Every structure is written in C-alpha cells, then in structure tokens.
C-alpha cells in the first residue's frame, strides 16, 4: 500500500518535564498577584486580565507539549511537533547516512542554537542549528535513542520514535519501491 499512512509512536516524554513550564508561570502569577495587591495605583481588575491570560498560556503550551506525531504517507515523512510540522520526501533523505544515536555519546549530533523552537531539558521541538551550522528539525523526547536523518539539502531531521529501527526500516523499504 504505497498510499496508506503509517504512524510511528513517538518515544514518551515524562509529564514531569512540564514542571519546567508550570513552575515559572505559576511563580509569575504569584508575583503579579502579590505586587498588584500591594500597590494602591493598581487595581484588582488587572488580575482579571493577567491571571486568566497566564492560565490560558499555560494550557496552550501544555497542549503543544503533547502534540507529537511521526507519519509515513504518500512517499513523505511527516513530523508534527508542538507548533511545528516538517515534511520530507523519502527520496530527499540520505538513508545510507542515517543512524540511531545516543546524544550523550555522540555530541556532534546534538542540536545547538534554537532558531524557532520549543524546548526544555529533555525535550526539543522545532528548528535548531547543529554545531556545524547545519539546519535541524527536531522532535527529541528521548536523547538516548535519536534517529539522525540527513537530507540532500544538507539539513537534518533528529527524531525520537519509540522504535527508531522500525521507522528506519520502513523508510528504507519505501525508498526501494
């Protein structure tokens, strides 16, 4: 079935990583409430706008954290991660150079500078620059098993599928068709 979409599970990211988001936002909310109530020039009405906005922001960023998908469909690898989506034709992948790596051991594959991304310790999503200045699109939830996929345009996909070997085998099978 060349046209059927195949989905590959993304390696799970522990929910406690959201504390990197929730704790600072709750700290900001507490700071805003305490300073608003201490100053006579500010009104409690300001809290009616600010606190719900922070709660909405927390909700949207939490929703985005769970928005992760890797699909192989119609000869394309489609990666959806937080606010980002990247499509790459299987024919544009250099599968002979693809590897499954542990980023702790192979630091040359680690994403470096965040260009347009969403990240916290142990979770990286979006557009980054590698140490050698190449562009990388990342969906990293488990740095110990990352599928490194170089593209012919000299950019890179860094993905954390639950079973990286299965995805690589499916990509190779698709490429030989």
Image (cartoon, helix red, strand yellow):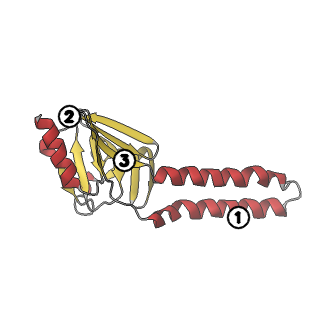
For label 3, the residue is 69
Instruction: Check the picture and name the quadrant holding the N terminus.
Output: top left
Image point (69%, 60%), residue name: 29
**Residue 34 visible in image:** yes
Q: Is 172 or 36 nearer to us in this picture?
A: 172
Q: Nearer the viewer, mark 3 or mark 1?
A: 3
Task: Look at discs 2 and 3 and give the one toward the viewer.
Answer: 2
Q: Pointer 2: what residue?
A: 2
Q: Quadrant of the C terminus?
A: top left
Position of residue 33 in the picture relative to residue 85 (left or right)? right
Disc marking residue 30: 1
Q: Secondary structure at mark 3?
A: strand
Element on which disc 1 rests? helix
Q: Are marks 2 and 3 in contact (CB under 8 Å)?
A: no
Q: Is residue 37 above or below residue 89?
A: below
Q: Position of residue 10 (x, y in %)?
A: 33, 54
At which x and y percent is residue 50? Answer: 73, 52
Q: Place residue 174 in its image quadrant.
A: top left
């Amino acid at each position: 079935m060349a046209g059927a979409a195949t989905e590959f599970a993304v390696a799970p990211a522990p929910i406690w990583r959201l504390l990197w988001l929730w704790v600072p936002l709750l700290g900001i909310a507490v700071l805003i409430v305490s300073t608003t109530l201490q100053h006579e020039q500010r009104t409690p009405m300001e809290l009616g706008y600010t606190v719900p906005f922070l709660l909405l922001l927390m909700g949207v960023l939490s929703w985005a954290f769970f928005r992760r998908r890797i699909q192989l469909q119609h000869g394309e690898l489609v990666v959806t991660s937080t606010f980002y989506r990247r499509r790459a034709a299987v024919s544009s992948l250099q599968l002979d150079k693809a590897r499954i790596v542990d980023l702790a051991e192979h630091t040359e594959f680690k994403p470096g500078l965040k260009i347009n991304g969403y990240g916290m310790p142990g979770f990286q999503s979006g557009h980054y620059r590698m140490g050698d200045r190449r562009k990388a699109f990342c969906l990293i939830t488990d740095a110990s098993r990352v599928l490194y996929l170089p593209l012919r345009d000299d950019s890179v996909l860094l993905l954390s599928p639950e079973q990286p070997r299965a995805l690589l085998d499916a990509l190779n099978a698709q490429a030989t068709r």
